[in-house]
Image (cartoon, rainbow, N blue to C red):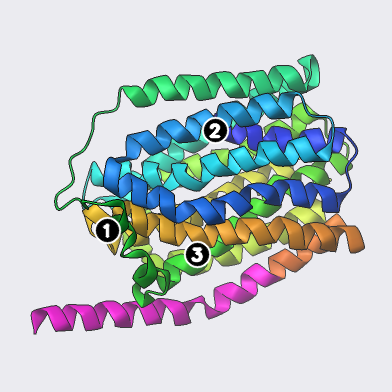
Amino acid sequence: MSLNGLMLLIPLYSIHLGFRLSDQGIIIAAPAAFMVVARLPGGAISDRFGERIVIWFSFTTLIIAAIIAASSNSIWPLIVSQLFSGASRSVYWSAAQSYVSRSAEGQHGTMMGRQLAFESGAGIVGAICFGFLAQVFGFACAFSLGAGTALIGILITTSLPAIPKKDQARSFKASFAPAKRMLFSRSLAFAHLVAFMAAAYAGLMAGLFIAFFRDTGYSEGEVGMVRALNSVGVVAIGFVFGMYLTRFGAKLVGMLGMTLTGLVAIGVATWGDQPILPVVLMTFSGMTFGSLRTLYPSIAAQNSAPNQRAMALSVVSLYWAIAMLLSPLIFGFIADATSIRTAMYIFGCFSISVAMISPLLFALGRDANLEKTTATQG
């Protein structure tokens, strides 16, 4: 709730202050700079000392980000706020996904789907509440709610039981050891691609989509409601993702997710200013994005040992962080040079094109797993 609320408020506030689309792109991309740097250390700390300490850090930095943003009226304080938000986002997901996956080994798709459904359900509440609070009571009040919900998160995390790890790394250096192999692992190649494309769309959602709906006349509260519809779709796919993945397999789920996400971006750009259609499109986009968002950690969890789970998730998420850095910057400048609609059309075509070549990376990972199984049996 806190994270999704702040992700909505920052671009709305930058629009409120009158920043250009390229400036907004820089603000939206700023967290990714920290996400790239801190992703792997966060995974190593989780594997060495446990996930809870990392989640505490994540909520603490969110509080700092909200406090700084509440008192900002220029671009640089907002960038600093976003850096603290990036520090939170850089470590939260891998630690939380590691904790959840280790709580039910062998049910990675189901557990990742449920986790994402709860997170997205809170995102729905956050987007609606934060958007209307900003509209009615001002941005300072909305940012204060963000800090308050993060504080509640710290208290809740304190109640989580520790989950022991078999063969836990005995040093921070040992926790880091698998990172280099995992970064270029063929068995994780498809997960890397899915993470990159999911984040590229998330970067678009966090910036251009919000600017697009504001440009078409939506108020802050209405933008929050439309943004929440995306989370409704994520919740819907999250609860059935395990069954969906079992039924269709990772290759088809990934390929369909990227193709349909691209088509939705094109659809929003074409019909986003029409009545009713944005509701349908944004809800459906949540389902397509949610399938990608849940798929890549599921693949990473399936292809990693429990004592290296957080590092594997961090490595895969590093590709997410890179896309979150590039997507808002690239498409923000494209939108400035052309138009928001044109930038969304270009992304849609890009996503569909990547989907068409994605089976090649899936085959690469499948062959690597087959070689590993053959060697083990031999």
Q: Is residue 72 left or right of residue 217?
A: left
The location of residue 39, given as percent across then percent down, is 47, 53
Q: CA distance from mark 1 to mark 3?
A: 28 Å
Per the image, the residue denoted by label 2 is 61
Q: Quadrant of residue 252?
A: bottom left
* Residue 364 drawn in magenta: yes
Q: Earlier in the sequence, mark 1 or mark 3?
A: 1
- Residue 219 lies in the magenta stretch: no
Q: Amino acid at mark 3?
A: Val
Q: Name the residue at 55% across, 42% down.
A: 87
Question: How far is the residue under mark 2 from the one under mark 3?
Answer: 27 Å
Q: Given the image, on which type of amino acid does mark 2 rest?
A: Thr
Q: Are marks 2 and 3 in contact (CB under 8 Å)?
A: no
Among numbered discs 1 and 2, the one appearing first in the sequence: 2
Q: Residues within 10 Å of mark 3 (few under 14, many from 20)?
A: many
**What segment is highlighted magenta in the picture?**
350-378
